[in-house]
């Protein structure tokens, strides 16, 4: 028991290093926060603090790190860069020319070489081949589209 008390500081620091090593395997920042508490207890032991103070330092620092530092660190590490957006997330807002007739019930549309089921939004006129549409949303495996306004250049203005 005397040996443990005499070398408590080094034992705490070895524990801290071991916990930091486990953190490298889990990458969840839990063991690293506990390792910080063990490191603080090791410093207290090396300056001659009693075992009760070592345990108090360990508990206080570990809990403080888990409660205050870990959530902030995780927020920064797991910040959403938008790089995870899927191809489907890029479809709404796209303008595409219709190859065939698209009605409120059925139709097909080719987008980037893929053929999709399509239908116009409720209340919109049907789309003729060659007309441009805007993709509004994806409903299951069907693109809901809105026809773009057509300008009839041949009209006499009457």
Image (tube, grey):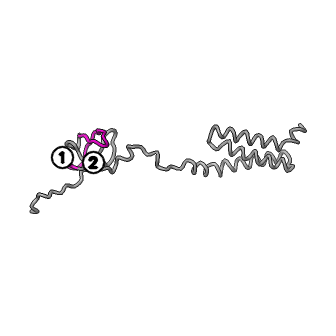
Q: Where residue 67 sits in the image (x, y, percent)?
A: 66, 49
Q: Which mark is residue 36?
A: none
Q: Where residue 136 sits in the image (x, y, percent)?
A: 31, 49
Residue at image point 74% right, 46% down: 37
Residue 108 drawn in magenta: yes
Classify mark 2: helix, strand or loop. strand
Residue 130 drawn in magenta: yes
The single residue placed furthest to the front in the displayed view is 113
Disc 1, disc 2: CB below 8 Å? no
146 to the left or right of 55: left
Question: Label 2: few (<14), some or many (≥20) within 10 Å?
Answer: some
Classify mark 1: helix, strand or loop. loop
Q: Looking at the image, which is closer to me, 34 or 155?
A: 155
Identify the magenta region: 106-131
Residue that mark 1 sits on: 128
Establish if 139 lies above or below 147: above
Residue at image point 82% right, 49% down: 44
Between disc 1 and disc 2, the foreground one is 2
Question: Label 1: few (<14), some or many (≥20) within 10 Å?
Answer: some
The single residue placed furthest to the right in the displayed view is 2
Quadrant where the N terminus lies? top right
Residue at image point 19% right, 55% down: 150
79 to the left or right of 91: right
The answer to which of marks 1 and 2 sits earlier in the sequence is 2
Residue at image point 86% right, 47% down: 50
42 to the left or right of 32: right
Quadrant where the C terminus lies? bottom left
Q: Where residue 32 sits in the image (x, y, percent)?
A: 68, 44
Residue that mark 2 sits on: 96
Q: Residue 24 lies in what quarter of the image?
A: top right
The alpha-carbon separation of the residues under discs 1 and 2 comes to: 13 Å
């Amino acid at each position: 028991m005397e040996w443990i008390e005499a070398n408590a500081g080094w034992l705490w620091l070895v524990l801290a290093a071991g916990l930091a090593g486990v953190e490298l395997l889990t990458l969840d920042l839990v063991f690293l926060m506990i390792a910080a508490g063990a490191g603080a207890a090791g410093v207290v032991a090396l300056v001659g603090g009693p075992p009760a103070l070592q345990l108090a330092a360990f508990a206080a620092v570990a809990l403080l790190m888990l409660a205050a530092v870990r959530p902030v660190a995780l927020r920064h590490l797991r910040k959403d860069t938008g790089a995870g957006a899927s191809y489907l997330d890029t479809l709404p807002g796209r303008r595409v020319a219709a190859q065939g007739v698209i009605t409120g019930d059925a139709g097909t549309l080719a987008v980037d070489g893929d053929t999709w089921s399509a239908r116009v939004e409720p209340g919109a006129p049907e789309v003729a081949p060659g007309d441009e549409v805007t993709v509004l949303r994806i409903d299951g495996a069907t693109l809901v589209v809105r026809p773009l306004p057509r300008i009839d250049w041949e009209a006499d203005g009457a």
